[in-house]
């Protein structure tokens, strides 16, 4: 299904995107208002349907390689968000339909998805190992929401240049982004470290902050101590640490109350 067909089905307005962008072929869709759910979605050639309109949704969509975004419920992002999408070549549309109806209309029109086929392909996806080793280190500032996600985005570009297989790169991006956002939301400052070897990628997130008093509780899905202002933006749903563990082949977390937290995550190649 082409993006122009989606525009017609959803009676959508084009916010940014040249005429040729509407000729993009879309084979999937993701409907979500939580960043963790969007990150965990592994569809290709997909359109993102969401009510989130802040700058991070553009970075998240670009990092996750979505073909376009459709803002639902009549939502319209600010001009700087639209400009950021334009700079990244990401088409934006808006529709008055709510999220549920938007997904339903597209599904009814033939945009069925390929969940079972993708799942099988990801499980079989094994490619050549990398040659040599490399370390990438990024400073992350707590509370700096505008810069959040840039470290992960830069690291992903390096992984792509190195030829890391798409499945491993996707998993690395998810755990790194969740870790980076945890630093931004909860800590004063921190680092995101990527150790890239021929056999694996080890991502270490270490921060200076309040630490975690009860790690077992923090690892439970849905548990969150994120401030309300971050929850309103689609973050802080209590899926950060669970997603980091879920998408890691090896996971280790240590924390000292009043000092900070260190998380190590290994992705096998």
Image (cartoon, rainbow, N blue to C red):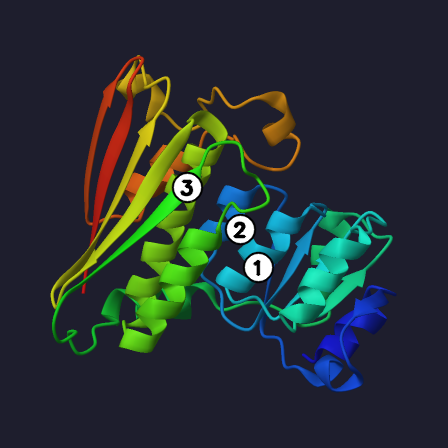
109 up-or-down from 34: above or below? below
Q: CA distance from mark 2 to mark 1?
A: 8 Å
Residues tagged 3 and 1 counted as in contact (Cβ below 8 A): no
Residue 216 is left or right of residue 150, and the answer is left
Number of the front mark, 2 or 1 = 1
Residue 129 is left or right of residue 246, and the answer is left
Q: Which residue is mark 3?
A: 140
Q: Which residue is mark 1?
A: 61
Residue 100 percent coordinates (x, y): 72, 48
Number of the front mark, 3 or 1 = 3
Q: Quadrant of the N terminus?
A: bottom right
55 up-or-down from 238: above or below? below
Q: CA distance from mark 2 to mark 3?
A: 22 Å
> In the depicted view, which residue is nearer to us: 186 or 109?
186
- Other-residue count near label 1 (Cα within 10 Å), few / some / many at <14 / 14–19 / ≥20: many
Residue at 80 percent of width and 50 percent of height: 78
Q: Which residue is mark 2?
A: 38
Residue 7 percent coordinates (x, y): 81, 71
Residue 171 is left or right of residue 183, and the answer is left
């Amino acid at each position: 299904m082409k993006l122009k067909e989606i525009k017609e089905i959803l009676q959508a307005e084009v916010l940014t995107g040249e005429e040729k962008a509407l000729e993009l072929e879309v084979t999937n869709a993701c409907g979500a208002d939580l960043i963790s759910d969007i990150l965990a979605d592994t569809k290709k050639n997909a359109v993102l349907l969401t009510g989130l309109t802040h700058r991070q949704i553009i970075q998240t969509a670009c990092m996750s390689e979505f073909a376009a975004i459709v803002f639902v419920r009549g939502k319209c992002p600010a001009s700087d968000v639209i400009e950021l999408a334009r700079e990244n070549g990401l088409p934006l549309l808006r529709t008055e339909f709510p999220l549920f109806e938007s997904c339903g209309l597209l599904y009814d029109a033939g945009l069925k998805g390929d969940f079972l086929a993708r799942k099988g392909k990801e499980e079989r996806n094994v490619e050549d190992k990398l040659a040599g080793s490399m370390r990438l280190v990024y400073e992350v500032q707590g509370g700096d929401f505008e810069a959040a996600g840039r470290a992960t985005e830069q690291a992903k570009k390096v992984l792509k240049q190195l030829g890391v297989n798409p499945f491993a790169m996707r998993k690395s991006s998810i755990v790194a982004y969740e870790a980076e956002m945890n630093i931004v939301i909860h800590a004063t400052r921190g680092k995101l470290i990527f150790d890239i070897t021929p056999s694996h990628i080890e991502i270490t997130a270490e921060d200076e902050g309040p630490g975690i008093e009860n790690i077992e509780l923090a690892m439970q899905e849905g548990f969150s101590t994120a401030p309300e202002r971050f929850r309103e933006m689609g973050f802080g749903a209590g899926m950060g640490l669970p997603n980091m563990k879920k998408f890691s082949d090896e996971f280790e977390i240590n924390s000292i109350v009043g000092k900070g937290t260190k998380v190590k995550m290994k992705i096998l190649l």
